[in-house]
Image (cartoon, helix red, strand yellow):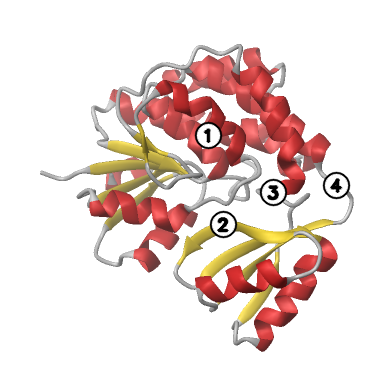
């Protein structure tokens, strides 16, 4: 019998119109969108469906993506498709928390609205991120450790793709050194700041105060933490892991490898885009992967 993981993408997958066909096709999706609007004080259908630069601004992007993920998840659950475990990349971890029944959608929307706002407000002037293509993990780690200024790993995405983050000049210099060490490409990312670096520490501490007001339940199904790349089974661990996640590396490759080690053989990516499906094929080409971002994907599923 297959072991199925629900996986949820993070920021950067957003686009105008995401989730619209689900919203128009399923009443349960409309309910989820309206709950998100109520909890965030933002007109989420308008944010997701109408042309606006807000969709690319962190404080709005995060709540928009999570709403789409939660809405699609509600339909998948309604269809009777059951997961063994779940995981999400950065923001996507909140989709995994909903899937594991650790957070109700209303609480998840409250937290993520504040998370996006605090991360936006904490962005220092002169922060940057860049994808490093074709360099070994130990090489990237070594360059970051030796570099002047703040630069560290933000994401371990898949073999041959690691993202670095920190002060702009430090990221640029680390990229130059990595090219000298044989990296194929250094791709600056179009983001509003240095996510998952120590520069976001204060945003995490602010988020902790919000988390302390939320009722977090024992996971009904285990999910994987970005921070540890391992299963979380105790509710008392969850808040501190979510606080650390804001300024710690996302260990996505290691998270997928942990699920594969546990016998997961089918991954269903829930949300906009196909980013995680692409990563998975580079981590293990034999694992089954399918993304569900638009209604027609349900037929494949």
Identity of the residue furthest to the front in this view: 146
* Nearer to me, 78 or 247: 247
SS for dot 4: loop
Instruction: Please give the residue where the numbered disc 3 appears in the rendered image.
Output: 195
In the rendered image, is residue 71 in sight? no
- Whether residue 291 sits left or right of residue 134 in the image: it is left
Whole-Å distance between the Cαs marked 3 and 1? 16 Å
Residue ranking furthest to the right: 125
- Mark 3 residue crowding within 10 angstroms, few (<14) / some (14–19) / many (20+): many
Give the secondary structure at mark 2: strand
219 up-or-down from 72: above or below: above
In the image, 135 versus 107, the foreground residue is: 135
Whichever of callouts 3 and 1 sits on the residue coming sooner in the sequence is 3
Image depth: mark 1 or mark 4 in front = 1
Q: Residue at x 51, y 39 (%)?
A: 92
Report whether 284 appears left or right of 69: left
Write down the quadrant of residue 167 in the picture. Answer: bottom right
Q: Give the camera-side residue of 23 and 293.
A: 293
Q: CA distance from mark 3 to mark 4?
A: 11 Å
The label number, if any, that marks residue 241 in the structure image: 1
**Earlier sequence position, callout 2 versus callout 1:** 2
Q: Quadrant of the N terminus?
A: top left
Q: Which residue is found at the position 61% from the left and 45% from the top?
A: 11
Which label number is shown at residue 2? none
In terms of sequence position, does the residue under pointer 2 or pointer 4 come before the other? 4
> CA gap, disc 1 to disc 4?
23 Å
Disc number for residue 155:
2
Name the residue beneath numbered marker 4: 124
- N-terminal of the two: label 1 or label 4? 4
Q: How many other residues sit within 10 Å of disc 1, few (<14), some (14-19) or many (≥20)?
A: some
């Amino acid at each position: 019998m297959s072991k199925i993981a629900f996986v949820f993408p993070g920021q950067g997958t957003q686009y105008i119109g995401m989730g619209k066909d689900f919203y128009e096709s399923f009443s349960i999706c409309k309910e989820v969108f309206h709950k998100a609007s109520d909890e965030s004080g933002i007109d989420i259908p308008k944010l997701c469906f109408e042309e606006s630069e807000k969709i690319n601004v962190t404080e709005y992007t995060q709540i928009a993506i999570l709403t789409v993920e939660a809405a699609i998840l509600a339909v998948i659950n309604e269809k009777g498709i059951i997961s063994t475990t779940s995981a999400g990349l950065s923001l996507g971890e909140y989709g995994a928390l909903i899937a594991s029944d650790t957070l109700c959608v209303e609480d998840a929307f409250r937290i993520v609205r504040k998370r996006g706002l605090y991360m936006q407000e904490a962005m220092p002037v002169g922060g940057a991120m860049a994808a490093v293509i074709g360099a070994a993990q130990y090489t990237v780690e070594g360059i970051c450790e030796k570099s002047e200024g703040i630069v560290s790993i933000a994401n371990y995405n898949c073999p041959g793709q690691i993202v670095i983050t920190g002060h702009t000049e430090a990221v640029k210099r680390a990229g130059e050194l990595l090219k000298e060490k044989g990296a194929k490409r250094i791709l600056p990312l179009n983001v509003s700041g240095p996510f998952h670096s120590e520069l976001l520490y204060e945003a995490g501490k602010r988020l902790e105060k919000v988390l302390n007001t939320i009722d977090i339940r024992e996971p009904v199904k285990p999910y994987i933490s970005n921070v540890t790349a391992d299963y979380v089974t105790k509710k008392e661990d969850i808040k501190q892991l979510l606080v650390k996640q804001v300024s710690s590396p996302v260990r996505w490759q290691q998270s997928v490898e942990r699920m594969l080690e546990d016998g997961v053989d089918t991954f269903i990516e829930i949300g906009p885009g196909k980013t995680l499906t692409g990563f998975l094929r580079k981590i293990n080409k034999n694992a089954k992967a399918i993304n569900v971002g638009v209604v027609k994907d349900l037929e494949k599923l």
